[in-house]
Amino acid sequence: MNFWMRNRFLLLLLSLSLAAVCENTSFAIDRQYQDRVDSLWTLANEHALHGRFSESIAVCRDLLDNYRLSGESRKNITWLILSDANNAGDFRLWCQYARPRYANKKARKHFKALAAQPPQALSRPDHDVTVPYSVDSIFFDGKYKGRMIKVPVTIGGKEERFLLDNGVAHFCSATETFAREHGIRPVGVETTVVGVAGKSSSWIGIADSLKLGELCLRNMLFLVVPDEALKNDVASIDAILGAGFFRTVGEMQFDNREQTVLFPVRQQDRPSNLTVNGAGMHFIEGVFRGDKLSFHLDLGSSTTSLNVWYYERNKERVQADFPADTTKSGGIGGIVQYLCYRVPDPDIEFDGKHFTGGNVTVDTVDMVDDPSCEGRVGNDVILHFDRAVLNIRKMFLYFE
């Protein structure tokens, strides 16, 4: 092999080697890039899951602004921003990201009307505020079926008792008669609400102020339903402090010996043990018969239960171990009666504390439950312990 041929051969080997190195380097860079994108996407979802909406939105914006993404990825990230903004009550931000390909015309019109309202806000003194709560017992067919927690609220110059119910996602709620008599004004949004017993037309209204002790909540949004939608012969419910209230006030300390709720001026930083989904439903993990289960936290429910999804997955064991019964549930659409199974001597563990209430059932019908959860935590769990500390804004619930 002469000098030129030998050098051409060496150059060919060198070029092939360099090509292999560049290909491997490019692959490594692409893999690192994708790993970074995946890591940020996981972080955004983790923030959203635990109610850290502003943090989740910040990560999503970083992804949209600074990374090369597929159309499908950009769509999923935008949908997460819309979900975060809705759960946070930031309707102006929702409108910024709600392009026609992400939200239909009707939804954009509704959120535009909500965005035009002044933001919901809290004014409070620089000290702890304590208010009393009362408990209404519920009876079905002469049998005790649980309790409802109500607090005194001044609205439109009148003091009324409002039900505490974080299960009313995003807003508070009231009947049309209550709204008309207490100055809750429509904002131009009509919608449909789904409850345990059916559906109902509704509209969104706004109240200039609510006063709960020394707390003053301004511009609170209400889901207003026809009187007949909540009418039943079991419980009288005219007005509800829903998730919008819980998110606005933050920490609530239930002292069940004194029957008071304390709203501390300096709120605790505790690890989050609650999660939230895109529909604004809150969840807590519990242990029942050795199984870790996800429970929907719903203070508007008078009793704790295992739901239809638990029943379907454990039907033979439930039917063999628990006696059958019938029960009723009330809400939008009135009252529904259905087959259930009674859990004798129940023991459900929440964050190391044992709930042993006496009215736990296994439901056999869908009560508008998320299929990912297998039970519902009612206010009987809150009332079971001497003290319960709940913070929907920071997403924790602890019992003492």
Image (spheres, rainbow, N blue to C red):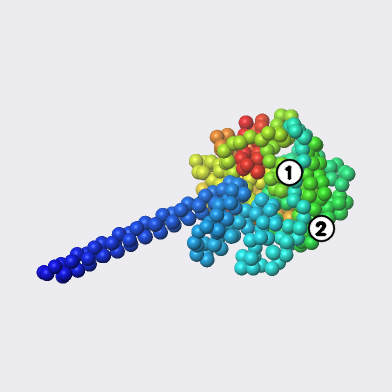
Give the secondary structure at mark 2: strand
Give the mark nearer the N terminus: 2 vs 1: 1
In the picture provided, is 132 more to the left or to the right than 267?
right
Q: Specify whether residue 163 is in view.
A: no
Q: Badge 1: few (under 14), some or many (20 or more) residues near its Cα, within 10 Å?
A: many
Give the position of the C terminus as an image quadrant: top right
Amino acid of disc 1 = Leu
Q: Which residue is mark 1?
A: 164
Disc marking residue 186: 2
- Front position in the image: 171 or 304: 171
Query: At which x and y percent is residue 177?
Result: 85, 54
Q: Specify whether residue 121 is in view.
A: yes
Give the secondary structure at mark 1: strand
Residue at the location (26% across, 65% down)? 15
Amino acid of disc 2 = Pro
Question: Quarter of the image holding residue 138?
Answer: top right
What's the distance in space between the residues labelled 2 and 1, CA to CA? 22 Å
In the picture provided, is 47 more to the left or to the right than 172?
left
- Front position in the image: 69 or 145: 69
Q: Nearer the viewer, mark 2 or mark 1?
A: 2
Residue at the location (16% across, 70% down)? 5
Residue at the location (50% across, 64% down)? 70
